[in-house]
Image (cartoon, rainbow, N blue to C red):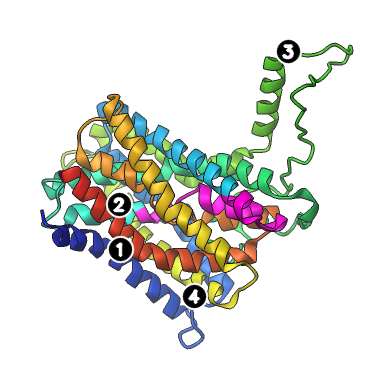
Amino acid sequence: MKFWDLFFVALMPVLETLLITLLGLLIATQRFNLLRSVEARNYLNNLVFYIFTPALLVADLAETITFNRLVEMWFLLVNIFLTLVVGSILGWMLNKIAKTPKHLRGLVNGCCTAGNLGNMLLIIVPAVCEQSSSIFGDSSTCSTYGQAYAAFSTGVGTVFIWTYLFIVMDTSTDKSTKKEINSDSVICSAGTLERFPPNITESLLTSTDSVSIDDLSIQPDHELPYDNNGRKTPILDNITSSITKCMGYVKVETVFTPSTIAVIIGFAIGAISPIKKLVVGDSAPFRVIISSASLVGEATIVSMTLVVGANLLNGLKKSGISIFLIIGIMVVRFIISPILGILIVKAAYYWGFIGSYSLYQFVLMLQYALPPATIVGTVAQMLGNGESECSLIMIWTYFIATFSLTLWCTFFMWMLEV
């Protein structure tokens, strides 16, 4: 297929995302005033978080996942973890090179660490499959697998981001510059968020206790910690203790979000054949359950993208972060990370960890080229640092992502077709 044919295949889903985002930005302006208020965005965002996205994940996974397919996708889970590790290392290097102000180190590292594994994959992957000139074969088969890959990435990504990203941003933030967070600043009551940060698109599930790792100390290499009897403890025990401490900072309720629970339910329905026969298929006696979930889930992508656009309006009014830091984040996310992603996926294919299915490899590579996850704003608000600067970073990175994603998707498809 010619380059320009591939370019237009990649351009269409990105343009769809951009147009819906611009619509969200437009209706959030003072003239229309539909998503201008924080309350309006919170209400729509809570619907996306608690209702639309879980319904979409359950429906997609139940219909597309089988036990054999779940086994085949094991490297997708590993790849998501690798995207976070690669991003956090690059973010740490950017902070060192740019000499980032102490209060912004956690935000910069977070933007480099986590890509938007939510609505971006849910939009781009199925849309690419639906193009008549797609390289991924029959559109129905491609869409079936594509939805499974995107839904799996969304659910698993939620778990990894809430654990790994939080630890990375907290350890990168200078503790002396942290703002005190009042216990009533974020309250989760009766399943509804009373207050919600205006610069993000994922809802926040947290307890009223602030999370900190101030008490975690790092021992010098030449010293070993002592136990209660004054004896030096083994290095292995010290490592185990540190891991246990780190895991103690991760709140269970932030990991088991509605999306995570939906993924577990979707996996159970899809992988267990007797259950799947009851709810999936034209002859299934309880097919109305999955069909209803699918109908509700169709509102996810549009609603989520509208909120993203509305939240980006805040970025037009914010300042306080160097343009060079924003450029550095974009270089990490849109140049260095995708190149490393190609090398990782090709190495995995060479060593036999993944098969030859081009769509699978495309999704794996695409995970490295995504703009920063909007959930970074949630964590920044929790830690009390950089939440205002996050909006400015988001508006620039998502604007540039319109061009970078198109070019990278084109290059990925060209490379997989050769």
Please name the residue that numbered disc 3 is placed on: 234
Which span of residues is magenta-colored? Answer: 94-120
Q: Mark 4 or mark 1: which is in front?
A: 1
Circle 1 crowding by C-alpha within 10 Å: few under 14, some 14–19, many from 20 = many
The residue indicated by pointer 1 is 14
Outermost residue toward the bottom in this view: 31
Q: Report which quarter residue 65 is drawn in.
A: top left
Query: For mark 4, what is the residue?
Result: 35
Q: Amino acid at mark 2?
A: Ser
**Cα distance in 3D space between marks 1 and 3:** 53 Å
Task: Say if 398 sits above or below 153 in the image.
Answer: below
| Residue located beneath label 2 in the image | 294
Q: Residue at x 33, y 72 (%)?
A: 19
Q: Closer to the camera: disc 1 or disc 3?
A: 3
Between label 4 and label 3, give the one nearer the viewer: 3
Image point (71%, 23%), residue name: 241
- Is residue 102 rendered to the left or right of residue 163? right
* Residue under the image location 60 percent in, 52 percent down: 97
Residue sitting at x 51%, y 75%: 313
User: Is 254 left or right of 126, judged from the image as shown?
Assistant: right
Residue 167 vertical placement versus 19 (above, below): above
- Residue 26, percent across and down? 42, 80
First along the sequence among labels 2 and 1 = 1
